[in-house]
Image: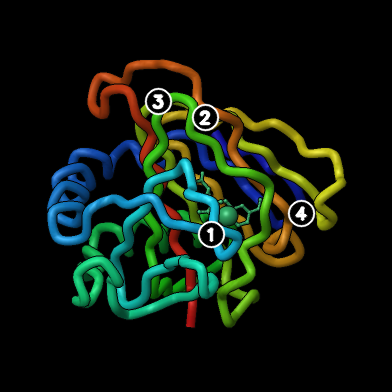
Amino acid sequence: RQQQLAQDAFVLRAFATPYVAQLLPLLETIQQASPFRHLVTPGGFRMSVAMTCCGALGWTSDRRGYRYSAIDPDNGRNWPAMPDIFLLLAQAAAAQAGFDGFLPDACLINRYQPGTRLTLHQDKDEQDYAAPIVSVSLGIPAMFLFGGHERSDKAARVPLFHGDVVVWGGVDRLRYHGVLPLKEAEHPLLGGQRINLTFRKAA
Ligand code: MD5
Ligand code: FE
């Protein structure tokens, strides 16, 4: 049930399963207030992943750069609050992997459809690299790429399924990572999509 990918990186298989029934209606409410959108990178490329956020801070990108912001630039309002059950799930998963006291202030919500991919990158826009990142997979499967500290390092492939939670911290926090293009599939609760919740301490 618990796989160690590296010194400070853990896959908790099906850890989120008991939470799913509570998460889905909350996700619906969040996306009504702050709908999914395809961000543009500073280089001018439209991301194939659609994103929204909840919590005090949300991650966003445009031609001026990547940043965390308290305001959703699409509606000028604060991001939806992080629901208590989101926070409880993230804290329980972090603690299970040995990171007690995780207090995320941002939850990035990624939506993948068949063909959507995320190229190798590092998550470097957070202030505090001592805090882990917790990632919750929902819906159709994805092949996660778990790389090294250089972009050219060979990446391991880790399949992620509905309910799986991955926790990265410590020496593994800044590894390159990505997601291969999703294959067509159907999930009984989410249909033909994958939703990934990524909890971070941004500030
Ligand atoms: C996803 N999202 O499946 C992934 C899960 C993102 C992103 O990469 O930036 O939104 S989070 C994966 C992650 C985060 C921090 C470190 C590492 C992986 N890692 O060292 O492999 O949508
Ligand atoms: Fe990332």
Question: Foreground residue, 139 or 113?
Answer: 113
Q: How many numbered marks does the figure carry?
A: 4
Question: Given contact means CB atoms under 8 Å apart, are the residues at marks 3 and 2 in contact?
Answer: yes
- C-alpha span from label 3 to label 1: 26 Å
Residue holding disc 3: 140
Residue holding disc 4: 7
Question: Foreground residue, 68 or 26?
Answer: 68
Between label 3 and label 1, give the one nearer the viewer. Answer: 1
Pointer 2 or 4: first along the chain: 4
Looking at the image, is 9 positioned above or below residue 114?
Answer: below
Point 14% across, 60% down: residue = 33
Question: Foreground residue, 152 or 1?
Answer: 152
Residue 142 badge: 2
Pointer 4 or 3: first along the chain: 4
Point 19% across, 69% down: residue = 75
Circle 4: element type: loop
The image position of residue 126, as x and y in percent, is: 56, 75
- C-alpha span from label 2 to label 4: 23 Å
Between label 1 and label 4, give the one nearer the viewer. Answer: 1
Identity of the amino acid at label 4? Gln
- 36 vs 156, left or right, is left
- 150 vs 180, left or right, is right
